[in-house]
Every structure is written in C-alpha cells, then in structure tokens.
Image (cartoon, helix red, strand yellow):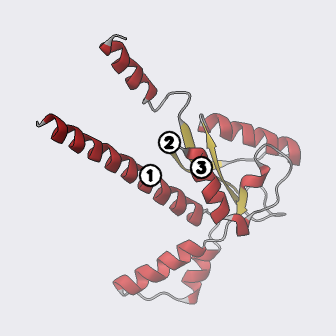
Amino acid sequence: MNLNAGALVAVTTLNLTDRNMKWLYCLFTWSLLPWRLPRFKIGIATNVPQRIAQIEYELSHALGRPVIVRRAAAFPIIGAGWLERRLHWVFDSLRAKMPKHAGKTEWFGIRNIGGVAILVWLSRQYGFEITPWHVLIVFFLPLPVDGFIVICVAAFLHYAVFCGVAWAFCMILITALNI
C-alpha cells in the first residue's frame, strides 16, 4: 500500500462530517403543553438536523398538531452508542411516556435536580444568598438543564480521555524514536 494513500484514508476517516461519525445530542420540546410537561431526549444520530426533522414529523403526525423540537447540545463522539446507553441508565427514573414514534423510549421528564444542586453549590462557594424561590425557578425551568450539563460533561470527559491517549501515544512514539 502506498504510504500517502494510507495517510489519505486516515484523514478522511477522522473527518467530523463523515457519515459514520455519531453525534450524541440532547433535544427538548415544549409542544406537548398543556397536557404533558416539557420533555428532553438523549440520542445519537449521524445527522442531527435531519433527526430533529424526523422527530418533529413523527410527533406531529402522532399528535395531529405541529410539534417543535429544539437542540440543547450535540457533540461528535466516538463510541456514542455506548455512552448513550449509560446516559439512558442515569436518567431512567425520569423516563416519560410519549406518543408512538421512533425513539419514543428515549424521552425524559425535565426535572432540574442537577441544576438546583449546582445553584446551591455556587451560592455556598461564592457566598450569594438564594431563596426557596430561586430553587423553585431553577427546578421548574422548562429547559433540560440536567440533560445539557450531563451531555457537556460526558463530551468533555470523552475529549479529555481521547486527547490524553493521543498525547501518551505521541510521547511513547517520540521516546521510542529518540527525537
């Protein structure tokens, strides 16, 4: 095999726009109001905007009215399927019933318990006063604060491990070659 051809294959397989790259995403919708509380969804897709359109179409068809789905966060992740299963396990107690569509078991109710915990920690860390009203506002905020935080932390840890392994590999290679 030509050495340049191998490098070209390596570069094209690491391209973030490659069809095989999986994105871990967190979506949410308010369109279920007033009958249901807002929901968020954690999933994986190769094309997140296309997946959002598919979910909107399926939910709109199931409910008989327009449904709007918004993206809270999306990150390209290697091994996104494994991470998605772990995040579903973390949020299993918040699982929400949804109309029949593809991915209906991946929706969770918005309960911003992690957001409240971060608010309390920040207030104690930086000494500002919080009232029960602040806690209630963050808890009932119709945005998936917990889903957003967990997706961002998972992506950060994934990238940190990936970069750490790459750095260690480079250091071993440099040591082995005596550069």
Which quadrant holds the C terminus? top left
Give the secondary structure at mark 2.
loop
- Between discs 3 and 1, the one toward the N terminus: 3
Q: Marks 1 and 2: CB-CB under 8 Å? A: yes
Asked whether 77 or 2 is in front, the reply is: 2
Is residue 26 at least partly visible in the picture?
A: no
Q: Which residue is mark 3?
A: 82
> Does residue 54 appear anywhere in the picture?
yes
* Residue under pointer 1: 158
Which kind of residue does numbered mark 1 sit on? His
Work out which residue is located at the far top of the displayed protein and give it: 2
The residue carrying mark 2 is: 78
Relative to 150, 103 lies left or right: right
Q: Is residue 35 left or right of residue 55?
A: right
The dot on residue 22 is none
The residue sitting at 82% across, 55% down in the picture is 98
| Residue type for callout 3 | Trp
Could you say whether the residue bearing mark 3 is in a helix, strand or loop?
helix
Element type at mark 1: helix
What residue do we see at 48% from left, 87% from top?
130
- What separation in Å lies between label 3 and label 1 (alpha carbons)? 12 Å
